[in-house]
Image: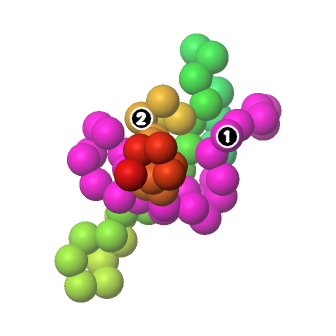
């Protein structure tokens, strides 16, 4: 079941649980009302690891003009 979300596929977000920048791949599930996303984290020289995280743990990496 797909739920409309403010998260965009292929965009980069800061994952608060990992403390690292991740790239969103796709929305995979809804668990207890939380939208879950498959994300890809880059580790070192070209190694990538895919994880499933909740939408709440993803924060946009782009700063708004008011925040700068």
Image coordinates for residue 65, horizontal then vertical, percent: 50, 51
* Residue found at the far top of this picture: 32
The image's mark for residue 59 is none
| Left or right, 15 with reference to 25 | left
In magenta stretch: residue 54: no
In magenta stretch: residue 14: yes
Image coordinates for residue 14, horizontal then vertical, percent: 38, 50
Task: Say whether residue 39 is visible.
Answer: no
Q: Which residue is mark 2?
A: 57
| Left or right, 20 with reference to 52 | left
The numbered mark, 2 or 1, whose residue comes first in the sequence reads 1
Image coordinates for residue 17, horizontal then vertical, percent: 29, 38
What crowding class fits label 1: few (fewer than 14 Cα within 10 Å), some (14-19), or many (20 or more)?
A: few
Counting every numbered tag in the picture gives 2
In the picture, which quadrant includes the N terminus? Answer: top right
* Placement of 44 over or under 31, stated as above or below: below
> Magenta residues, as a range?
1-26
Residue 2 picture quarter = top right
Q: CA distance from mark 2 to mark 1?
A: 13 Å
* Placement of 49 over or under 52, stated as above or below: below
* Residue found at the far bottom of this picture: 45
* Residue found at the far left of this picture: 44
Q: Secondary structure at mark 2?
A: helix
Image coordinates for residue 58, horizontal then vertical, percent: 45, 41
* Placement of 20 over or under 53, stated as above or below: below
Q: Between residues 58 and 51, which one lies in front from this camera angle?
A: 58
The image's mark for residue 6 is 1
Q: Between residues 67 and 10, which one lies in front from this camera angle?
A: 67
| Left or right, 24 with reference to 44 | right
Q: Residue at x 61, y 31 (%)?
A: 35
């Amino acid at each position: 079941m797909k739920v409309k979300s403010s998260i965009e596929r292929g965009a980069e977000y800061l994952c608060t649980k990992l403390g690292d920048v991740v790239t969103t791949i796709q929305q995979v599930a809804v668990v207890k009302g939380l939208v879950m996303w498959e994300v890809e984290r880059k580790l070192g020289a070209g190694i990538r690891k895919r994880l499933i995280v909740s939408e709440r743990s993803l924060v946009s990496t782009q700063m708004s003009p008011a925040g700068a």
